[in-house]
């Protein structure tokens, strides 16, 4: 049974799924579609061309579907799509896309957005992603599945964050993060594998050994980067888990890839000589 509090304002045209509860003082715009079994606790603002998947729970003062924070936005009917079974806590903000990109900000299933976190315009966020308090994604960021962002982590626009990564609290992410990486610091650097996250996903010891070898080949080798990638691909391209790193690096082309602190220090030292 759908329950709408009498103080809520639901604009004509809005689509509300069966069994959804909309609490006091919520505002739902005319182009919004809310799936079945959702709960808008109270004081939730949903506007724009926004679709919310089934059984998602949204807490007070979340604002979803507002225009992009971009001077290039021209007022077009761009979209925000949020998957099912997400939990969106107090003060979370998510913007629709812009006309100059794909026109959509996309969030996957079972994501957890803690207080004050933000998803910028044209982002693509995978499934089972967590943003802790006040973590923020700039525009056009791509996030793989099973990524965790610690509190107040910040991701620069157009950056890719590979699946299974862990971004520590207060980290500044300014370059692409390979799958399963662990990022620490501001500016952030790769400090190793996201071992805890991998173990929680049931990765075997043999998988872990291969991933560690792949990281050594990619980040610790002394030859040129293209040669290190070729070596990595030659050994692991068909590997079901390490092959994801190979594919991620190759799809990035000439994009900047986040390095280890040791590799970045060596690069700076070489440039100074």
Image: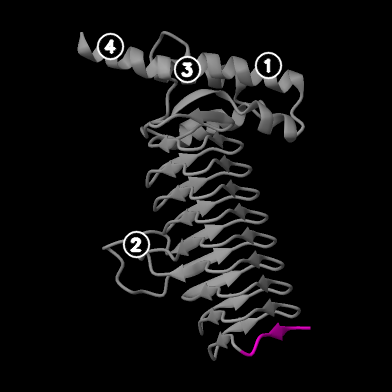
- Please report contact status of discs 1 and 2: CB closer than 8 Å, yes or no: no
Label 3 sits on a secondary structure element that is helix
Instruction: For marks 3 and 2, give the CA distance.
Output: 36 Å
- Please report contact status of discs 3 and 2: CB closer than 8 Å, yes or no: no
Residue position marked by numbered label 3 in the rendering: 219
Q: Residues within 10 Å of mark 1 (few under 14, many from 20)?
A: few
Q: Which mark is residue 18?
A: none
Q: Which residues are magenta?
A: 1-6
Instruction: For marks 4 and 3, give the CA distance.
Output: 16 Å
Is residue 5 on the magenta stretch?
yes
Residue position marked by numbered label 1 in the rendering: 209
Q: Residues within 10 Å of mark 2 (few under 14, many from 20)?
A: some
Label 2 sits on a secondary structure element that is loop
Q: Position of residue 181 (x, y in %)?
A: 55, 29
Residue position marked by numbered label 4 in the rendering: 269
Disc nearer the start of the sequence (3/2): 2
Residue 31 appearing in the image = yes
Quarter residue 81 falls in: bottom right
Is residue 259 on the magenta stretch?
no
Disc nearer the start of the sequence (1/2): 2
- Please report contact status of discs 4 and 3: CB closer than 8 Å, yes or no: no
**Which numbered disc, 4 or 3, marks the residue closer to the eye?**
4
Question: Residue drawn 44% across and 49% down?
Answer: 137
Label 1 sits on a secondary structure element that is helix
Is 13 situated left or right of 55 in this image? Answer: left
Instruction: For marks 4 and 1, give the CA distance.
Output: 31 Å
**Which numbered disc, 3 or 2, marks the residue closer to the eye?**
2
Residue position marked by numbered label 2 in the rendering: 69
Instruction: For marks 3 and 1, give the CA distance.
Output: 15 Å
């Amino acid at each position: 049974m759908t329950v709408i509090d009498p103080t809520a304002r639901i604009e004509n045209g809005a689509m509300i799924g069966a069994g959804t509860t909309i609490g006091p003082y919520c505002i739902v715009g005319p182009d919004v579609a809310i799936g079945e079994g959702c709960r808008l606790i109270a004081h939730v603002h949903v506007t724009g061309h926004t679709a919310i998947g089934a059984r998602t729970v949204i807490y007070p003062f979340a604002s979803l579907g507002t225009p992009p924070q971009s001077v290039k936005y021209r007022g077009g009917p761009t979209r925000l799509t949020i998957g099912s079974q997400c939990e969106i806590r107090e003060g979370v903000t998510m913007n629709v896309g812009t006309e100059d990109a794909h026109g959509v900000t996309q969030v996957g299933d079972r994501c957890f957005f803690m207080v004050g976190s933000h998803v910028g315009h044209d982002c693509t966020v995978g499934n089972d992603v967590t943003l802790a308090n006040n973590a923020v994604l700039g525009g056009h960021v791509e996030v793989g599945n099973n990524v965790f962002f610690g509190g107040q982590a910040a991701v620069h626009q157009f950056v890719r964050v590979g699946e299974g990564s862990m971004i520590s609290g207060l980290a500044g992410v300014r370059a692409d993060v390979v799958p399963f990486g662990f990022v620490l610091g501001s500016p952030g650097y790769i400090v190793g594998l996201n071992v805890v996250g991998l173990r929680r996903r049931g990765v075997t010891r043999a998988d872990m050994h291969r991933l560690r070898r792949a990281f050594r080949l990619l980040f610790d080798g002394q030859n040129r980067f293209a040669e290190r990638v070729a070596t990595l691909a030659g050994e692991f391209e068909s590997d079901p888990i390490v092959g994801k790193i190979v594919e991620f690096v190759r799809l990035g082309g000439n994009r900047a890839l986040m390095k280890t602190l040791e590799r970045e220090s060596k690069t700076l030292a070489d440039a100074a000589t």
